[in-house]
Amino acid sequence: MKMGSASAGLVSIFSNGYRSLSAPVSSWRTLASSSLYKHYKRNSKSAVFSCLSSSKIELSCLSSKVDVAQTTTTSVNGYHKYDRLLPCPSENGPPRVEHLVVSEGGPVLEYICKSLDLPPLFVADLIHFGAVYYALVCPQPPPSATPEQIRIFKEVTAPSVLSKRTSIKGKTVREAQKTFRITHVEQFVEAGTYLRVHVHPKRFPRCYEIDWKSRIIAVTDSYVVLDKPAGTSVGGTSDNIEESCATFASRALGFSTPLKTTHQIDNCTEGCVVLARTKEYCSIFHGKIREKKVKKLYLALTAAPVPIGIITHYMRPINVAPRLVSEDFIKGWYLCKLEVMECKEVPWPDPVIQQKYCIEDSEWPSKDRAYGCKINLLTGRTHQVRAQLAACGAPIVGDSMYMPAAIAEMANPGLNPFGKYKKYTTESDKEMTVTKWFAQFGKEPKVAIGLQACQISWDDGEHFYEARSPWWRSGMA
């Protein structure tokens, strides 16, 4: 049963709190060949929750820009006709996330193909990329769900229906609503199973441009140290574990077992990352991070000077970018500390270098000079260096997310509700001010910003590694 489009909130609310990923799909499985699908049937049935997801952009289901290989064929259901996920497009298109409830057991590929009118090879690619999830029981719909969606949810989660399903006996409803990755095209899904299909996974074209062997810093029996290129993901995203540093570094080294992620740096940041060769060392390295035995130094290219010394902020505990920080202590907010060890005036990157690394122009008023900073990261929060430096009025060059807010605050110092010159007087004023402040931030950079994880060491320097010179120094004498 096909249902109409739901609001964007369906995606985030359906997935929040339920994600529990299974082991990564093998990086070595060849994208499925057509011979696998000679028994493909088009008579399966399913109930469908359908929606487009969006963060800060308004999407149209008739958009001609989709995240698949370009094709000139006619459109299907408002989208260009799908073929394969490779070759990788140079630009990401609008997200598309579909929610299905299976009404008759069978192979997962058949249900998705029939329900969404997608070709088998394309769906096989999605499964290979890790873009398809399942839960034994459909999660609770959001308040914005339509009456028809609510009806289907109640129908498939009625106690009389769930009591007959042997697969969920002994599980609580919440346990049965946890999502896991589909790992094989022939995986069986029983009636009542919930499916979430990321039809347009986030893509990383930079992965195909990199000489990955040249980015390897060290190889040991336990781990690999990689000089991560900007514009790539360390371990992949929720809808794409194929186009990641872990996958491509594993292939470059000829490893039969994929490398495992031990820590993260932002997609737009370059520099040292440690990838474990075994689950055991992955656990060991996580322990070293928790025990603060891992030291990370960063090089940052900022648009304004930064004072030498320790800078302290408190980060809002909401897992949404941009990350908001406050100079004042706020209960429940995360402590963020970094030490600026040096800050020197340097030339602003020339246009040729900026173009080579796709540095985005956020209209910083003065580009006569920039500032090269060395930073000791004392706490490790997502976007911490970027958010803290921007809050100091010294955003990182090319940071199209945080620099616009810094520029806006320069023009109107009272705009930042967590800055020195905050103006709100009541809680209701504060809410409006926070909303207005949030709107000042831009989009995530496409490729690089002036930030590099230049050094990583642990066990009191027993293990010490450095990255190559950062991109902005490649044009300096």
Image (cartoon, rainbow, N blue to C red):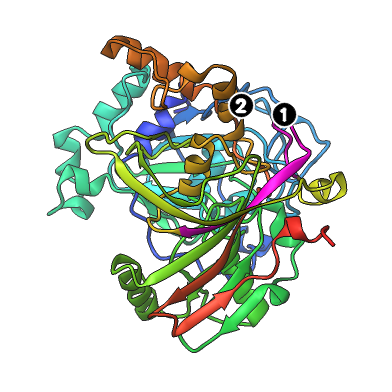
Pinpoint residue 8: horizontal percent, then vertical percent: 47, 25
| Element marked by disc 1 | loop
Crowd tier of the residue under label 2, counting other residues whose Cα lies within 10 Å: few below 14, some 14–19, many 20 or above? many
- Residue drawn at (38%, 51%) of the image: 337
Specify whether residue 223 is in view: no
Which comes before the other along the chain, label 2 or label 1? 1
Identity of the amino acid at label 1? Glu
Q: How many labels does the image show?
A: 2
Above or below, comparing residue 16 to residue 243 in the picture: above
Specify whether residue 334 is in view: yes
Q: Mark on residue 218?
A: none
Magenta-drawn stretch contains 435: no
Can you identify the residue that label 2 sits on? Answer: 407
Pinpoint residue 68: horizontal percent, then vertical percent: 70, 44
- Residue drawn at (60%, 23%) of the image: 59
Pinpoint residue 285: horizontal percent, then vertical percent: 37, 74
| Element marked by disc 2 | helix
Q: Mark on residue 363?
A: 1
Pinpoint residue 97: horizontal percent, then vertical percent: 51, 36
Identity of the amino acid at label 2? Ile
- Start-end of magenta stretch: 359-376
Above or below, comparing residue 200 to residue 419 in the picture: below
Q: Do the residues labelled 2 and 1 touch (CB within 8 Å)?
A: yes
- Residue drawn at (45%, 47%) of the image: 384
